[in-house]
Image (cartoon, rainbow, N blue to C red):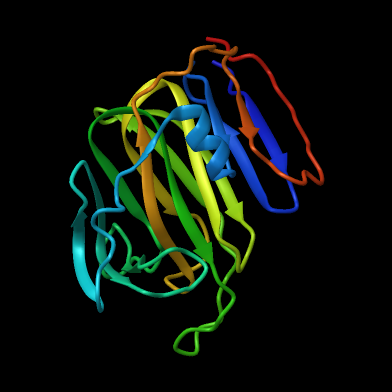
Amino acid sequence: MSISKTTFVTFASVFTASFASAASFTVYDNKAAFLSDTAAADLTSPYLPVTGSVQASVFDFGSVSVFSNRMFINEYTTLLSGPEIGVSFGINGSNDLSENIDIVFDSDVYSAGFDIVETTEAISGVTPINSTFSVTFVNNGVNVESFHFNVEDDVAAFVGVWSDTPFDTLKIRELDGNNDNEYFGHIYAGTQAPQVVPSPTAVVAGFAGLGYLTLRKRRYQK
């Protein structure tokens, strides 16, 4: 089996898609384009008007839940329509200082996305580290596909995916950095499958002001 790899570089973000199966998907950094294409809904809007700081290891937003070891909901930044989720200890316990979370949907979806901010403000004397994340979308415990992203600092960013294969979980893992400066906002999802399925590869959609793009594609083979 060979693995295809597509790398996209822009002024705003870096996305790297790795292919472990024959699923096809599109990665978005433009929320408006994502919502228009997928008809996804904001699953967290009825729940996120929280007053004060709330701590938990699970936040249940009705049809979607967020899991980590210790998280807080608070108004961390004015860049997003808050409040936001901040991760204190990642998914692997109190020794995990990475901002790792699982987003679990009650039923299968074809599209999902989330707001995110990476700030450069030092918190509690900790100098923020520029972080790259992986996103693996999973169906019934089986990995469907994954990609990497690195958003621009100090802006309201968005990461979304639309797959021709349904999934029920997003596993978001910080590959470098610590529990310093990333905050997660609203979560979106949709049950509409893509109408046109491309060959097994990935593209990035919705990049306004695309500055530089590198695209390498090899067809997936078994």
Q: Examine the rendered structure and indicate whether residue 29 appears above or below residue 21.
A: below
The location of residue 152, given as percent across then percent down, is 64, 59
Q: Residue at x 19, y 57 (%)?
A: 58
Q: Nearer the viewer, residue 18 or 33?
A: 33
Q: Residue at x 56, y 80 (%)?
A: 121
**Which corner quadrant of the image does residue 219 belong to?**
top right
The location of residue 124, given as percent across then percent down, is 44, 88
Instruction: List the single residue furthest toward the right.
Output: 212
The location of residue 184, given as percent across then percent down, is 41, 59
Q: Examine the rendered structure and indicate whether residue 129 appears above or below residue 2.
A: below
The location of residue 139, given as percent across then percent down, is 30, 27
Q: Nearer the viewer, residue 11 or 173?
A: 11
Q: Nearer the viewer, residue 151 or 30?
A: 30
Q: Is residue 21 rendered to the left or right of residue 32?
A: left
Q: Nearer the viewer, residue 147 or 48?
A: 48
Q: Residue at x 21, y 72 (%)?
A: 55
Q: Examine the rendered structure and indicate whether residue 215 appears above or below residue 196.
A: below
Q: Examine the rendered structure and indicate whether residue 117 appears above or below residue 170.
A: below
**Which corner quadrant of the image does residue 97 belong to?**
bottom left
Q: Residue at x 31, y 53 (%)?
A: 45
Instruction: List the single residue furthest toward the bottom.
Output: 125
Q: Say which quadrant the N terminus sits in.
A: top right
User: How many numbered marks, from 0 up?
Assistant: 0
